[in-house]
Amino acid sequence: MSTESTSAILRNQVDLLDFIDWTGVECLNQNTSHSFPNALKQGYREDEGLNLESDADEQLLIYIPFTQVIKLHSIVIKGPEEEGPQTVKLYTNKEHMGFSNVSDFPPSDTLTLSPENLQGKPVVLKYVKFQNVRSLTIFIEDNQSGSDVTKVQKIILQGTTVETTDMKGLKKIEDH
């Protein structure tokens, strides 16, 4: 692929924040004082003092449904150097996952976050595996230092929406 077409693809990627179905977002093992809106919602995620933090141990399981089908290109997971996530597994279109069954499914992609990623460098995903995404489950398996608390400052999902037919725009064909 030429660099011109690669940059054109990257230019069309948007922050998918507006396409998240907020009523269905769930996060298992979150500290109630430091919950998922701190990392996901506009305004909160820009505040360096706010984090999503794990509660009982270092793992977090975040379920994010979308209001329409999307193509996911890359993800930004920002966190502190020590307590920031290290191993992150992504699952597409899997509902009702919990810590007891997360290992029963093969992940769509497994990421090992570097210090550069934790500072905001996007991780480009295996694009072919993220073409028709209705929901995304993010399983944060461990953190950089092995401590009991994982902290996430910001999660940004970058991609595009899948063009779908607008049924309201269709007009009935009149009989002649």
Image (spheres, grey):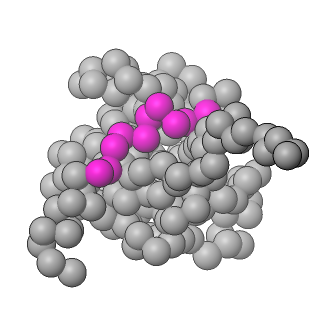
Taking depth in this image into account, of 96 and 49 the one nearest to the observer is: 96
Q: Residue furthest left?
A: 3
Which residue is located at x 21 percent, y 60 percent? 8
Q: Residue at x 58, y 57 (%)?
A: 133
Please determine whether, in this image, residue 134 is positioned above or below residue 4: above
Along the viewing direction, whichever of 59 and 119 lies nearer the viewer: 119
Residue range (magenta):
12-21
Residue 62 sits above or below residue 39 on the image: below
In depth, the one of 118 and 100 nearer the eye is 118
At 43% across and 26% down in the image, what residue appears? 41
Left of 25 or right of it: where is 114?
Answer: left
The image quadrant of residue 1 is bottom left
Q: Does residue 151 appear in this view? A: no
Residue 135 in magenta? Answer: no
Q: Is residue 88 left or right of residue 169?
A: left
Q: Is residue 165 visible?
A: yes
- Across and down, in percent, residue 141 comes to 49, 59
Residue located at (67% from left, 27% from top) = 23
Give the x, y percent position of residue 120. 21, 46
Residue farthest to the bottom? Answer: 1
